[in-house]
Image (cartoon, coloured by chain):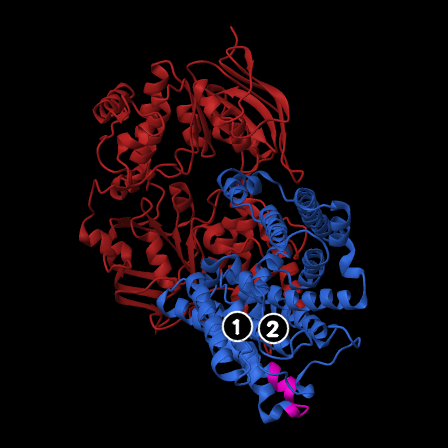
Chain colours: A blue, B red
Amino acid sequence: MSSLSSTRRAVFLRELGRALTAVVIALVVALIVIFVTSANPGAAFQTLLTAPLSSNRTMGLWIDDVAKLTLTGLAFSLVFQARQFSMGVQGQVYVGGLCAALVAMSPIGATPLAIPLGMLAGMIAGAAYGFIPGYAKARFGASEIVSSLMLNYIAILVVNYLIRAHLAPPGTGQLMTAKFPDPAIFPAIIPGTRFDLGILIALVATFVVWFLLYRTNWGLKLRLVGHNPKFAEYAGIRASFIMVSAMTVAGAFGGLLGSVFVQGRAFGNLAQNFDGNLAFEGILIAIVARSRPLAVPFVALAYGYLRQGAQLMGIRTDVPTEMISVVQAIIILLVASSFSLPGKALLARLTGRRTVPAAAPEAAK
Amino acid sequence: MAPLLEAISIGKTYPGGTVANDGVNLSVEAGEVHAVVGENGAGKSTLMKILFGIEQPDRGELRLDGRPVAFANPREAIDHGIGMVFQHFSLVPSFSVYENVVLGSEPRDGIRFDRAKAIEAVRALSEKFRLSVDPLPPVGQLPVGQQQRVEILKALYRDARILILDEPTAVLAPQEVEELFVAIRALVAQGRTVIFIAHKLPEVLEISDRITVMRGGRTVGSVGTKQVTEDSLATMMVGREIALRVDRAAARGGVTCEIKALRIANDRGGTIAEDLSLNVHAGEILGLVGVEGNGQAELLEAVAGLRGIAEGAVHLDGTSLEPLSVLQRRELGVASIPEDRLARGLATGATIAENLVATRLSDRRFVRNGLLDLKAVKAHAAALIERFSIRAGGPGFAVGTLSGGNMQKVVVARELAEQPKLLLVNQPTRGVDLGATQFIWKSLTAARDGGAAVLLSSADLSELLALSDRLVVFYRGKIVAAFHNTDDLTPETLGTYMLGLDTQEPETMRAALQ
């Protein structure tokens, strides 16, 4: 099977090359933006490239982002592999975070059960929230894109309202709850940093998603539905069950991310708009990782570095924070477009795909 | 005098290293019908795409009227007087015939689309070239043969001197093929040149003046049609002697599948097919004859469980199939080779092993406690690759990397891995080369000899006549004729019923339906 491993390696190298090209282009664009807006572009650019490594604390920030990006990337990878375009991770993060916070703020919060039960509550809530658009699609044909996006707004606004009106300490005017008791907050792996249990949870989750997709009956069915739903139906696979269950399981990972957010050392409480739109960046992670769970942490590592570098550049240099968002958006645009040029796919379908396999006497004899 | 169109040592390598053309030569004289034949994967389509500017050659040269030319895109090829009709039409179904013909080069009156002039132009063209089509109805309402004429008119409207027809007969009934040939002769009589891609050899011999044979990305040679026979041509194509003969069933068994007064409806409740009553016996192949879209495919889908049954019943060995799911039917011994392997028969992005096991995911050999036994899955795939001589790198390769014939073998291998009781087959060898066709036919007859009742639908009448023990003809969703397959049954006889030109005596039909 040496030919197989060599083709796999070729594919891997091609994908890696693409990702690196996109990153380089993004950096060039970032450099231009920096030159236009900064009095000291050299220092600003250096900050962008090196700041995440500058101290234990910044490395902790970076790794904390990596853990969260990995989890959202996994949740998106699962639904993308089933070719469902549920965008509901953000909503799942909020309901998951809310339920984890409720556990942490209850009497259980002071016991050693606070962390596992908080995570479990988050996962159940997220799963339930992921189930809704799946069921609506299977039962009523509702587009999962629209319903999941709408559910995101509902979750964010309801959670924000609950924090403001009921959960924040009365009379303080704060838009966050009080800190959870210590047993409900993830222990730090390196004291004094955000390097906490989150990254371990993310790595275990990576393995679990990989195992589910590639070693179980359910995962094979899910991937077959994703490859070709009509084939799945013909082969006797219940596509709608797979669809709903994929969205539900992905929802559980979204909810878990909610728990990692609120119980992690970065917060340790439930605040309004706590996810900072990070949940959505999982789409990018999943696209670049081609929805392969084992590639997700690596993509998260690279993307998280750029993201953290850009944020630190915003704090430490004179590059305005708005420009940081522009640079981030450009990175997203470039990386995403180099992977999913719809025009390219269409062209391939119109011209190549019909004939290339026919004209090709086996890729490898 | 230089030939009208010449391709000289064309080479084309696709990204990924597939050599599609390697030193291909083609020389087409003005006013001839030039056939290009070869198996699938021989490089015909690539060559045509190069001639039409869709692909650019890596090596070699094109000459038109003796002058070198290069087409960067189809537009330039059209400007040089080359037109192409693809196997899959590119028509707008809701637009009328004349709108489709002039689309993109509309006659104008100021900035207005001059409809009267367009209709007039289309009428004039269809008269001149004996391609009678009414310019006014929407294209979507026309039968396939008429749609093809619209495609040809499209090319002629753009002043094509050279017309490339890519497998034009694949979708036509025999009578429609005749009409197409009349039109081709009219085209040539008026000085146009036709390049005709095909792999049905009798048709090639009938219509063409010269034949270029391709094999494995190279041209084997160019011969005058009068100098070859079907056998010598087949040998040139394949490079070895092949025999496409099948043994008929020795004896048939009892009734396996009984279809009674079946009605099939579409999503809106409209009737697609009705009053279908058939018995299929163990050990026989029952051929479903008909122009595509007359209900044969829907019957197979209804039996497989992919489509609802509006009225009537389907029994397999006395068990009603109607309440059963696809999977339950499969467990009873129903196997099915679907019409379009890419659309329904395979997940091309998944590996060969995954495709081969997809219908057996409740089998304890491969799945226990919800976990895949990867070793068993791989061994299963390796055994089937061996048994069905699928040319592939191994079980772990994506199905999408295989050639059409080998993809179809994956489908056949999956469905025939275990002896089925009822085998539903639709277009088993469409777009498959002769070698694989021969193999697939053998596999089907082996399943029949093993006791399977086989329902076979195909657009290729010679395939139906070669394999079937009995044949029923569909026309507009009804069975209009039934035959025992004897040597004096001809495609033309079947064709008259396929087009609804003739009806059979009820008694004759009933006798052949039993």
Percent x, y of residue B461: 38, 42
Label 2's element? Answer: helix
Instruction: In the rendered view, tell whether residue A123 sits above or below residue B218.
Output: below
Residue at 21 percent of width and 40 percent of height: B501
Q: Which residue is mark 1?
A: A92
Q: Is B217 placed left or right of B321 in the picture?
A: right
The image shows residue A338, relative to residue B49, as above or below, that is below
Nearer to the camera, A119 or A249 = A119
Q: Quadrant of residue B125?
A: top left
Identity, as a three-letter code, of the amino acid under mark 2: Leu
* Residue farthest top in this picture: B1
- Dot 2 falls on which chain? A
Foreground of the two, A210 or B349: A210
Label whose residue precedes the other's in the sequence (2 or 1): 1
Secondary structure type for disc 1: helix
Q: Nearer the viewer, residue B224 or B219?
A: B219
The answer to whether the residues at label 2 and label 1 have Cβ atoms under 8 Å apart is yes
Neighbor class of circle 1 (other Cα within 10 Å; few <14, some 14-19, many 20+) is: many
Instruction: Judge left or right: residue A230 versus residue B271.
Output: right
